[in-house]
Amino acid sequence: MLKHFSLLFLVVICFSIPAHADSYNNQEGAFSYFVSETGAVLTDWNGRKIDEATSILVLPSFLGGSPLVGIGTNALSTVSFDGDLTKLEIIVPEGVTYLEKDAFEDCCHATAIQLPSTLRDIPEGCFFHVTAEISFPNGNAYFSCEDGFLVDISTSTLLYSSPSSYNNALPDIKRIGESSIDNWAYEKKDFFLPQTITSIGTMVFYDLPDLESLSLPSGVAEIDSHCFSCTGLMYVELPSSLKIIPPYCFTNCSLKSIHFPEGIMHISEFAFYQNWENIETITLPASVQFVGYQAFPEETQIITLNAHTHFETREEYDQRFQSSELKQLN
């Protein structure tokens, strides 16, 4: 009986393994990859497959006999590269259709990246900690790359700004994508955003200590978590179109005062926590219905114009946080 059970268990295990499981971690030269249903996906490279004379890395069009269709998460990071290479040009071949999240994150040595006309999917935050110039030598119907700004045409989202964008004005986009303006905003104390912007991604202004003031366009309706945290912001003008201020949005700033326009309804947990300046008093408009746990510094006096504004307790926050974790597990 035990033998029959063991055999059945092994059969179940075998059939539960994905069809392409044995294709993971394949190696061809300097490149690691797996083969998906549509083709090969690059997962890593060892930093040696470079033309030393020209400092050019040309990614292969085929791996394991399958066409290269994707660049995997962190596949082209150069953080661990221990050579003397200071300039690196990366050429992604025609046929590649998508980049996975953070595909080029920490590709610190790259000074130029050429992308193919076949590319259709670039996630936000894909070029975090990158200072390369990006181009499409053969053009691309889905993305534009002008004045140093990489833009998703269909969603009007800024995906990346190269060092050459520094002195140029941001294009008329609808969304500033995650970590997309690092090179453009570097060491700027203040700047103006296009009035066309309606949403701003997570960590867009994160860790910009020189940024002191910012006026958000009147049409901004959405900002993501950690958007302005760890900046030198002393003044920020929030638009009435904004309904929700997300968690940790303005933590570790230097705000001297905060003005909330009528229209804001929800202020999330730790939104303005750990401010480096002493904000003695703030007034919440009647539109504010909910204030998350420790949304403001403990020493700040809060005046509410809505007697029914709910301030979340520690117990309520813990319960909500635990419920959220359980949902993610399920």
Image (spheres, rainbow, N blue to C red):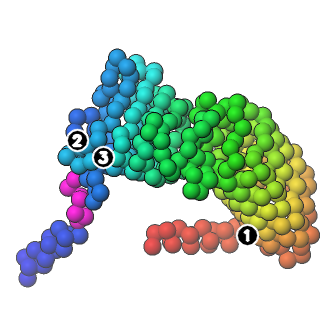
Between tags 2 and 3, which lies in front? 3
For badge 3, the amino acid type reads Leu
- Residue 316 sits in quarter: bottom right
**Residue 315 placement (x, y as % from top left):** 67, 71
Residue under pointer 2: 27
Left or right side of 305 for 122: left
The question of residue 20 being in magenta is answered with yes
**Residue 264 placement (x, y as % from top left):** 81, 65
Q: Calculate the distance from the C-alpha at mark 1 to the C-alpha at mark 3.
A: 52 Å
Q: Look at the image and tell me whether residue 107 can be seen.
A: no
Dot 2 or dot 3: first in sequence order is 2
**Residue 121 placement (x, y as % from top left):** 46, 53
Residue under pointer 3: 68
Is 155 in front, or is 55?
155
In the picture, the quarter occupied by the C terminus is bottom left
Is 125 in front, or is 156?
156
Q: Residue at x 56, y 50 (%)?
A: 152
Is 68 in front, or is 297?
68
Residue 57 against residue 180 in the figure, above or below: above
Which label belongs to residue 313? 1
The question of residue 224 being in magenta is answered with no
Residue 18 against residue 194 in the figure, above or below: below
